[in-house]
Structures are given as structure tokens and as C-alpha cells.
Image (cartoon, rainbow, N blue to C red):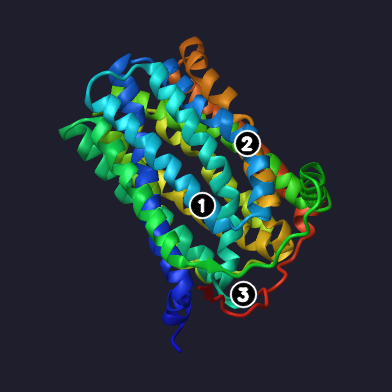
Amino acid sequence: MSKTSERFGPLGEPVFRRYFAGQAVSHLGDRMTPVALAFAVLRLTGSATDLGVVVAAGTVPLAVLLLVGGVWADRLDRRVVMLTTDAVRAVVQGLLAVLLLTGTARVWHLAVLAAAAGAAQAFFEPAATGMVPQVVSGARLTQANALVGLSQNAAMIVGPLVAGAIVATTSPGAAIAADAVTFVVSAAFLWRLGSVAAEPAARTTFVAELAGGLREVASRPWLAAMVGGFTVYHAVVLPAVLVLGPVTAERRYSGAATWAVVSASFGIGAVLSAVVALRVRPRRPIVWCALLLVGGSLQPVFVGVALPVAAIAVLIAVSGASVSVLFVIWDTTLARQVPRTALSRVSSFDYFGSTVGMPVGFALVGPASELWGVAPTMVGASLIGVSWAVMTAALPSVRSLRDAGPVASPAPTALA
């Protein structure tokens, strides 16, 4: 078998192929929504603070419910959890599209519906993380994670460009409607997946199972350290990018079209790095994760210092490549180091760390930019993110973890 065919080998497994196809479509819609939602708010009020409030509204229930979602994803059939949340988000995005298309939307409508979508996502993400090792053979887990990452990264290119074109030619509501359709498509592929065999987790009480997940995290200092790094990245760096980036594009460049190009550039870098991610096997995976987080943390300064659009696009592509390889290494390391019966709970603590500071970050980044200026706020966010990532890389527990090798498991089969 050639090296190329081996890298794409997971697509030869029918269960993974169906899972991959549905999630690829869903990822496309996911990457359209931030562009559409940002310009929906900006066209309603023009306020960076309002945009921060709407985005924060989606992250509050996400942060609050993630740990609950992790426990239930380990308890229940993860496919059913994903199906249910896809259905909820299709309805939520459909309603949001109707409000925008009919001209009746208000900022509080957008905030409430963003909160509903965030609540559903809190159950979906831990289930999806635990699902990947169930739908592919263990020897192909790295390639499977890389392919899932590839679909997400390709969506970073296509999604913002499509959303930018739709927003520029029609309205943000039309782009949101397209996202609603992608959830329906994702659910259809999950339905066709059939039940997938999984090792059952021991059932006790909810609190005991939640505590068990916390023990799994606490017993691995490298894991807790990286969760802290992700917390800083998502609470400080991403709000500066996602809120002040569109504001910068609107005030300094060509609005939605420019921001679509910048967002797509992140995806281009991520896709180009997929070739590396398909075969990467670092000896010290968490050191790599921390150092790659440096590249991701530079995004705000790249956007905020008044560079030409072409220069921003190139530098953001480098950040995209860093983040892409980072999460392939991270997801694969989690799957190799954490028991599968606890993987959704552990990933929920990971996601919780990534989201717990986001509501505050999104709510404060707008006022901070009004107090200190947009560019200084973005530069400051990058300095904080880079400093924290470098400190994480220097921790003994991070430097001491070595690659554990492939997980041994047979190819999964769908159950009738």
C-alpha cells in the first residue's frame, strides 16, 4: 500500500467514511455562521460591544453544560446524543434565519438563540470527541483525527468565503439558513451510521461519574496544564480575533469581504498543514502542542497592526497551520492516554477549560477596545497568549510525556 493511500486509509472503513461525510458538511456550516452572525449584529447596531455580548451569550450555556454533556456522552449512545443536538441546532438556526430574513431580528433575539445553540453544542462536542475512536480502527486513529481536522480546516476556507459572498450579495440571514440545512445533512449521515459498538462505562451516580472524570484529568498534570493554556487562548486570544477582527475589517478595510479572506486564509494554512498532520508523531507531543499554541496566539497582533491585507492573510495562514497540527496531536494524545470509557468526560473538562473564560472575554473585549483602542487591545491579547503558551511548554510534566504509540483495536462495525 502506498504512503498516500495509507494516510487516507480510514476512508476505506465504511463506518468512518459515513461519519466523516456528515461532519464535513456540518463543519462547513459552522464556519459560515461566525461571519454571518458578526455582520448581522454590526448591521443592526454597529456596536463591537453588542457583538461581544451575542457571542458571549452562546458561550455561557456551553461552559455551564459541558461537564454535564461529558457525563451523558459517556453514559449514552454517543451517536444518539449527536443526532439530538443536530436536530436542536437545525431548529435554532432556522428560527434565527427567519428572524433575520424578515427584518424582525433584534440583538436580544440573536443572544437568546446563540445561547440555545451553545447549550446543544455542550452535549455535542464531548460526544463527538469520544465518537472518533469508536468509528475507526485503533491503528488509524491519528489519520482519522487528521482527516476530521482536514474537513474542519477546509471548511475554514470555503465557509467564510461562501458566507462573505452570501452576506455581500443577499443578507446574513441567508447564510444562517444554509447552516441550518447542514445540521439536517449531518443528522442524516449519523442516522445512516447505525448503532456503533462501544465499551460501556460503569454506571454509578452522576456526581461520582463527574468526579471520576476530574480524577482522570488531575492524575495527568500535563493534561491539566494544557487545559489551562487552552483557557487563556479562548478567553483572551479568540475574543480579540472574533470580535475585533470584524470590527477592524469594517473600519479599516472592505468589511465582510476582507474578513472572509482573512478567515479563509486561516483555513488555507490549516489545510496545507494537513499533509504534515497525517504523518506527524512527535516524541514529546504536549511540548509540541504548547509551542504550536504560540502560533495560534499571534493572530490578534497579525490583524491589529494595520498590515496590508495580503500580509495579514499570509501570517494568519501560518497561525492556521499551527492550530491545525496542534489539535491533531492533542486529540490523538488524549485518545491514547485516556481510557475510552472516560474520554467524553475528560474531553468535557478540556472543552470546559476552553470555554469557561470566553463569556467574560467576549463581553469585555469590546469595552476594552473602546478604552484602550482596537489595535493596542489586540496586541495585548497576543502577548498574554504567547507568554502563557511558552510557560506551559517549560513545565516538567509537559516535557516528560512521551508518545504512547498506536491504540490497538479492531475496525469498528455498525450494528443493525
In the rendered image, residue 353, in percent from the top left (x then y), is placed at 66, 39
Disc 2 is placed on an element classified as: helix
How far is mark 3 from mark 1, CA to CA?
22 Å
Above or below 354: residue 250:
above
**What amino acid does circle 3 point to?**
Gly
| Quadrant position of residue 50 | top left
In the rendered image, residue 362, in percent from the top left (x then y), is placed at 52, 24
In the rendered image, residue 157, in percent from the top left (x then y), is placed at 33, 50
Give the residue at mark 3: 138
| Quadrant position of residue 357 | top right
| Mark 2 or 1, nearer chain start | 2
Tag shown at residue 82: 1
How far is mark 2 from mark 3, CA to CA?
30 Å
- Which residue is drawn at the image coordinates 74% and 45% (left, top)? 225
Mark 3 crowd level (few <14, some 14–19, many ≥20, 10 Å Cα):
many
| Mark 2 or 3, nearer chain start | 2
How far is mark 2 from mark 1, CA to CA?
15 Å
Disc 3 is placed on an element classified as: helix
- Which residue is drawn at the image coordinates 47% and 17% (left, top)? 366
